[in-house]
Image (tube, rainbow, N blue to C red):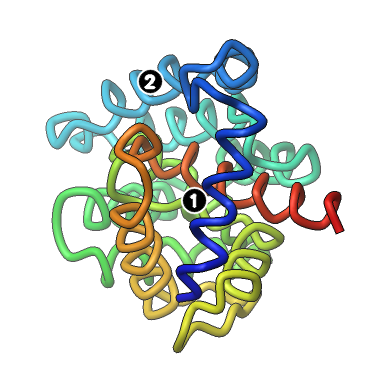
Amino acid sequence: MNRTKLKEAEARFFTRYPGGFSDPLMLEIAKKHKVEKMNKLAQDSFTIETFKNPGVIVDSMKKIVSQSSMVSIFEKPKFRDLATTISDNEKERLSHGLKEFLHGDQESGFRLMSELLNEYKLAKWPLLTVCPIYYRPAVEVFVKPTTAKGVIEYFELEGLKYSPKPTFEFYRAYREQINQIKKEVDASLQVDNGAFCGFLMMSIENSADSE
């Protein structure tokens, strides 16, 4: 990791937003993303008890994907169609994958979800990581291709090579480095990982603007 670039990014961010994430401009951005509402929806929908009914879980996944500002308008209808048309057995597989990811063996859960979505050519990073980050926002990461590639390249994260094909190995390594980077910045920026990665990406864009 390039700590010099990180400190420069932090300084640029506070110059533009003196209040950090509490700055009025940042609060307006957060309001558009409905972060608190989405976190509560995921946390209420994916308690261990709710996984007794796979159909309800898949419906909740569909609702979160549809309402999330982080998922593209191209992926939302495709996932909605999938969630509506897959068989009960497939709903059970998808639900079990999410249950394992959130409450059990993460690697197994990631693989189960990825394999099922891949059968419909929908094994996309955003669809696989959107529910986990709302459920556990201070720990999990949302892998948006442009952001992940930008952060890895700009901050020179070692041992990470982005691939459009989702793998748990990349997810785990990327999450580890994001959570490590978060410890290196001002405490006021050590918030949920969605906002933190937003800060990193905004810093990269601001750097390009200032050149």
Residue at 27% x, 71% y: name it. 107
- Where residue 163 appears, as percent x and y from the top left, is 62, 79
Identify the residue under disc 2.
Answer: 41
Name the disc covering residue 185, or none.
none
Relative depth, front residue between 75 and 88: 75
Q: Is residue 149 above or below residue 207?
A: below
- Where residue 195 appears, as percent x and y from the top left, is 49, 37
Name the disc covering residue 142, or none.
1
Left/right placement of residue 161 relative to residue 100 reads right
Residue at 55% x, 24% y: name it. 18
Alpha-carbon span between mark 1 and mark 2: 16 Å
- Where residue 158 appears, as percent x and y from the top left, is 46, 85
Quarter holding the C terminus is bottom right
Relative depth, front residue between 87 and 31: 31
Amino acid type at circle 1 is: Phe
Amino acid type at circle 2 is: Leu
Left/right placement of residue 87 relative to residue 124 reads left
